[in-house]
Image (cartoon, grey):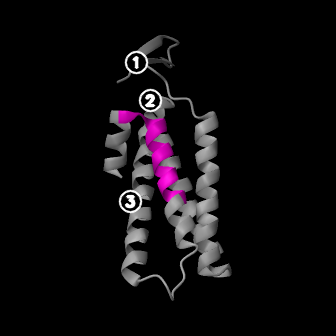
Amino acid sequence: RPGGGWISDKIGRKLTLMIAFAGIASSFLILGNVDKDTWSISWVVGLTILGGIFSQAGSGAVFAMVPLIQRRLTGQFAGMVGAFGAAGSVMFLTVNSLVEYDEFFMLIGIVAVSVLVVIMLFLDEPKNQMTEVLDDGTVKIIKLN
């Protein structure tokens, strides 16, 4: 997670999220097509680790977006991001109990592709500076890296 946040500070949050979700989608779509007769366990474990790295980096990049929403509510939004992440994991684990493993990995890959498309089309990252209206009505300009 910290690596994803650090990378997003260096190259941009949107680009980091796009790379992370492309990696998540690729790794899980491939895992959904694993054939136990032709794939070695070391390749499957390696691909699973790679998918986990992309997933954790994406998580860090999502948390890096939180202060851009409204800085004075960073704690509240960070808590909501964490809570929705936990709810999503429970949802996916429930689905995992209802379908075969290959279908489960394909579902994760398809959801990741869907999120990637949403990021590409709708996520606007502020450039250079952003403004925030404080409680007293004053406007503060915040310089961004």
**Closer to us: 137 or 129:** 129
Q: Main secondary structure of the magenta part?
A: helix
| Amino acid of disc 3 | Ile
Residue position marked by numbered label 2 in the rendering: 71
For disc 1, the neighbor class at 10 Å (few under 14, some 14 to 19, many from 20) is few
Residue 29's quadrant in the figure? bottom right
Magenta range is 11-25
Q: Residue furthest right?
A: 98
Q: x, y percentage for residue 73?
A: 48, 34
Q: Secondary structure at mark 1?
A: strand
* Dot 3 alpha-carbon crowd within 10 angstroms: few under 14, some 14 to 19, many 20 or more: some
Asked if marks 3 and 2 touch (Cβ < 8 Å), the reply is no
Q: Is residue 55 magenta?
A: no
From what the image shows, is residue 43 above or below residue 5? below
Type of amino acid at the residue the image marks with label 2: Arg
Q: Position of residue 61 (x, y in %)?
A: 42, 44
* Callout 3 secondary element: helix
Tell me if I can see residue 50 in this picture. Answer: yes
- Determine which quarter of the picture holds residue 97: bottom right
Q: Position of residue 77 (x, y in %)?
A: 50, 41
Q: Earlier in the sequence, mark 2 or mark 1?
A: 2
Farthest residue in the top direction? 138
- Residue at 43 percent across and 17 percent down: it is 129
CA separation in Å, label 2 and label 1: 10 Å
For label 3, the residue is: 53
Residues under numbered marks 2 and 1 in contact, where contact means CB atoms less than 8 Å apart:
yes
Nearer mark to the viewer, of 1 and 3? 3
Q: Which mark is residue 142?
A: 1
Compute the Cα span from label 3 to label 2: 28 Å
| Cβ atoms at labels 1 and 3 below 8 Å apart | no
